[in-house]
Image (tube, rainbow, N blue to C red):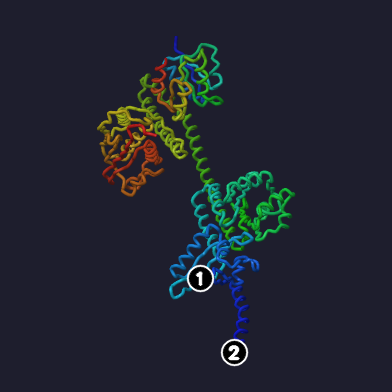
Amino acid sequence: MKKKILVADDDPAIVDAIQMILEDEGFDVETTVNGETVGKMNKRHPDLLLLDIWMSGQDGREIAKRLKHEKKTKNIPIILISATKDIEKSAKEAGADNFLAKPFEIQDLLKIVHRYV
Amino acid sequence: MAKPKVQIAKKDNAPRLELAQKAAHIGTFEWDFQTNKVIWSQELKNIYGRQKDSFKGTYSDVANAMFSPDRKATNQTIQNAIKEQKELKVEYRIVWPDKSMHWLQARGKTFYNVKGKPLRMIGVVIDITDRKRLEDNLQFLSDASRIFSSSLDFQTTVNSVAKLAVPHIADWCAVDMLDSKGEIEQVALAHKDPKKIAWARRLRKKMPVSRDDTSGVPKVLRTGKPEFFPYISDEMLIAAVKNKEQLKIIRNLGISSAITVPLRMNKKVIGAITFVATESGHHFTKTDLATAQELANRASLALENARLYTESQNALKQRNEFISIASHELKTPVTSIKAYAQVLQRRFSKMGDQLAATQLEKMDGQLVKLTNLINDLLDITKIESGKIMFNEEKFDFDGLISEIVEDLQHTTDAHHIVQSGKVSKKVFGDKDRIGQVLTNLISNAIKYSPHSKKILVQVGTYNNHVKVCVKDYGVGISKEKQEKVFERFYRVSGPKEDTYPGLGLGLYISSEIVKRQGGRIWVESTENKGSTFCFTLPIEQKKH
């Protein structure tokens, strides 16, 4: 079975572009532009979560913290993505497994993704 | 027959002399050392504020009238003049029976017998209170101006000036300002005794000043005209207070005189400075009023400067915030365009359409430039607002250099970047930021040496520091421009004064990074021969 990656970013174009990259790489990609739906994963849990730090209405770091605290979701690796480089530290404090600054090189994205799935 | 005539003349002269002394405000004295008796002229009694016959005619009575802190030094000066057979000239303060303070100047001549034993002293005394007051006022104004120009923080300066006013200018000095709601707020209050300040603050809470009060600060705020009370009578107090309790408190305070002058900003009255005389018993004069008005003018100017400064700082802050938000917003579309370009490039490459793939690669290269420009703008706002952060850790310095040299070699076919030297140690610092400095220096070397091939990157250590130099053989920088290259927005122009593309931010950002990482950055250059940019960084973590 293909590994599943959930991509959450409030910008549809970024979600779309990342989906193209990851699907070309052979992943099963699920997307959302709404931060509030990230925590409510009833179906099969993703194997990796790519999460924007500043989702509209929701701070990606808060989502990461919450998921890392819950038994069911704490083992899902989380990569936080943000246009602010300086946020790396607080991203890691929120429990994110890794961090990627926008805009990024495909090869850097894939390098990090392959570390977890 | 001649004798009585002279006596008549003498008798006739005495009142005239007295009149002359009174008109000139000059008092005379005669001090007999044998009997220790002191004789004062009528005018000297006036100068000492004495009622008829209240002067005991002894030197100890004279000394007792002196303001106690001045007594010892004044006596010493007098004794020295007598001993050294010099003319006496001394200035001292006295306290009148009504407790008011006065400055006197005494001059005296001592007479001796043939053996040099002092017999008596005669002399003149004048009241120099007004002159001293003027000197104090001028000194106060000059000190206040210095304080106003020393800081743009109005609250700090106004406190210092109020403190400066007491006790020489007034016993109390208060500054009231209108707050944003138009209420009167006391922003400074000074008295030589801190206990009294605390008491006055409590009193103010109990009896708040109302904007509608008919006298004092509220009136000055309404009219913009100074209030001047040289003499404050009990009737005036009764008229000013609202109830018996207030009257009791204000009577106990013993106000003798008061001045309130308006403070203006942007031509509007926004506050007032008040001077009050209490225990000194001083009565303010027109000179004091002029001093107070001059002080208010200078304070108004300081306020105006502070306002303009705050305004410009706010504008700067707004600009920085705007650039910060704009840069951030720009990154979102750049991120998706970049991702699309790269994914399409991969797809075309796989399909074997090399032309399309190469064009998309070029597009990606342009997006890298765009990203760098946005990052430079963001860095500037971070540096200027003091929000630049460093993620410091130990990292492989040599590895970083090699990585960057290799990356940048890919960007140019015309140059050969030659790396030499090693640190062979881990260095403590922000790897990304230090990499940014090196990238900037090598990119500049490429940019500014379009017609030469070689670029040297030399790495070494000394004194627990790493030193990195980037040498090119390009256009170089003239001596006078070398000092400016690290300034914001400065751009080096070419031989025909044509400028190279760029925002002129790179070296400024690099120098700020190096400085904040505890290092130094500089340039050595000869025009048309090339430039060498070097920077140093401490190897170990700074000890805090």
In 3D space, how far apart are the residues under numbered discs 1 and 2 (Cα atoms)? 34 Å
Task: Give the percent coordinates (x, y) of residue B209.
Answer: 68, 48
Q: Give above or below for B101 relative to B515.
A: below
* Element type at mark 2: helix
Q: Secondary structure at mark 1?
A: strand
| Residue B487 rendering spot, x and y as whole percentages | 39, 44
Mark 1, Cα crowd under 10 Å, few <14 / some 14-19 / many 20+, is many
Q: Chain of mark 2?
A: B
Which label sits on residue B108?
1
Q: Is residue B163 visible?
A: yes
**Looking at the picture, how far across and down is residue B344, in whole percent?**
41, 23
Count of all numbered marks drawn on residues in the image: 2
Chain letter for mark 1: B
Residue B261 visible somewhere in the drawing: no
Amino acid at the residue labelled 1: Gly
Question: Which image quadrant is residue B238 in?
Answer: bottom right
Q: Residue at x 45, y 17 (%)?
A: A77
Residue at 27 percent of width and 46 percent of height? B526
Which residue occupies the extreme bottom position in the image? B1
Residue count near mark 2 (Cα–Cα under 10 Å), binned few <14, some 14–19, many ≥20:
few
A40 over B341 or under it: above or below = above
Label placed on residue B2? 2
